[in-house]
Image (cartoon, rainbow, N blue to C red):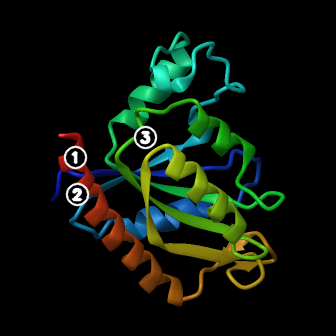
């Protein structure tokens, strides 16, 4: 087993959220991998208020305990898979807020994206790509997008189509490759 650690960040905290089933599916698919250790990081376990740090995150001078806990959690990973719903043509507010809390902890690491929505969450991913670039997160090309119309029964019971298995395997391959390469940059 590789010493690479990758967080699967669940970017929704809504009651009855579809994201938990999607994140669990990603984690299950990752469990057979030997190139990295994958771990679920659920934003519901990190109840961050709206960004409340006086200093910009790029300073790395965190005053609040919730920020310090979040920073310590994120700093320990070499890469991330953001699992995001699409809300109003973008990612969720809770995920954007959690990302905005930090800066250096994201730098020179790799990111991949899994989304869901009426158009597969494609617009959420596009926004996350721009955000990631600003944070010096190297995002991989492969993404996995689930449609509420074809990958969910009654828009709520997750039943992913078989073609997503190959897509997520490619995402893992790309992410592990980039995470390993960037670890040497940070080292």
Indicate which disc residue 25 carries: none
Q: Which of 108 and 67 is in front in this view?
A: 108
Residue 90 falls in image quadrant: bottom right
Q: Distance between the residues labelled 3 and 2?
A: 15 Å
Q: Residue at x 64, y 27 (%)?
A: 48
- Say few, some or many: other residues with alpha carbon within 10 Å of mark 1 (under 14 / 14 to 19 / 20 or more): few
Give the labeled residue for mark 2. 181
Which badge, 3 or 2, comes first in the chain's sequence? 3
Q: How far apart are marks 1 and 3 (CA)?
A: 13 Å
What x and y, as percent, mark residue 110?
38, 55
- Say few, some or many: other residues with alpha carbon within 10 Å of mark 2 (under 14 / 14 to 19 / 20 or more): some
Residue 121 appears in the picture as rendered: no
Q: How far apart are marks 1 and 2 (CA)?
A: 7 Å
Q: Which residue is drawn at 58% across and 15% down?
A: 55
Secondary structure of residue under mark 2: helix
Secondary structure of residue under mark 3: loop
Question: For the C terminus, which image quadrant?
Answer: top left
Labelled pair 1, 2 in contact (Cβ < 8 Å):
yes
Q: Is residue 82 left or right of residue 124?
A: left
- Tell me if residue 9 comes above or below residue 105 in the rendering: below
| Residue at the front extreme, as displayed | 134
What x and y, as percent, mark residue 79?
37, 51
Number of the front mark, 1 or 3: 1
Which badge, 1 or 3, comes first in the chain's sequence? 3
Residue 1 appears in the picture as rendered: yes
Residue 124 falls in image quadrant: bottom right
Q: In this view, does 94 lie to the left or right of 38?
A: right
What x and y, as percent, mark residue 36?
26, 58
Give the labeled residue for mark 3. 106
- Say few, some or many: other residues with alpha carbon within 10 Å of mark 3 (under 14 / 14 to 19 / 20 or more): many
Give the labeled residue for mark 1. 185
């Amino acid at each position: 087993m590789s010493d690479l650690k990758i967080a699967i960040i669940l970017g929704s905290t809504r009651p009855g959220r579809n994201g938990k089933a999607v994140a669990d599916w990603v984690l299950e698919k990752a469990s057979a991998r030997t190139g990295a250790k994958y771990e679920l990081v659920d934003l519901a376990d990190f109840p961050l208020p709206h960004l409340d740090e006086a200093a910009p995150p790029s300073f790395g001078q965190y005053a609040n305990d919730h920020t310090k806990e979040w920073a310590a959690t994120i700093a320990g990973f070499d890469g991330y898979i953001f699992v995001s719903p699409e809300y109003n043509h973008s990612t969720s507010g809770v995920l954007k807020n959690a990302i905005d809390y930090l800066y250096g902890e994201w730098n020179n690491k790799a990111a991949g994206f899994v989304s869901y929505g009426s158009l597969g969450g494609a617009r959420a991913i596009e926004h996350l790509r721009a955000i990631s670039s600003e944070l010096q997160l190297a995002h991989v090309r492969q993404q996995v997008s689930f449609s509420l119309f074809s990958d969910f029964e009654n828009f709520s019971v997750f039943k992913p189509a078989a073609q997503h298995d190959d897509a997520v395997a490619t995402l893992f391959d790309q992410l592990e490759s980039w995470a390993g390469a960037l670890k040497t940059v940070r080292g």
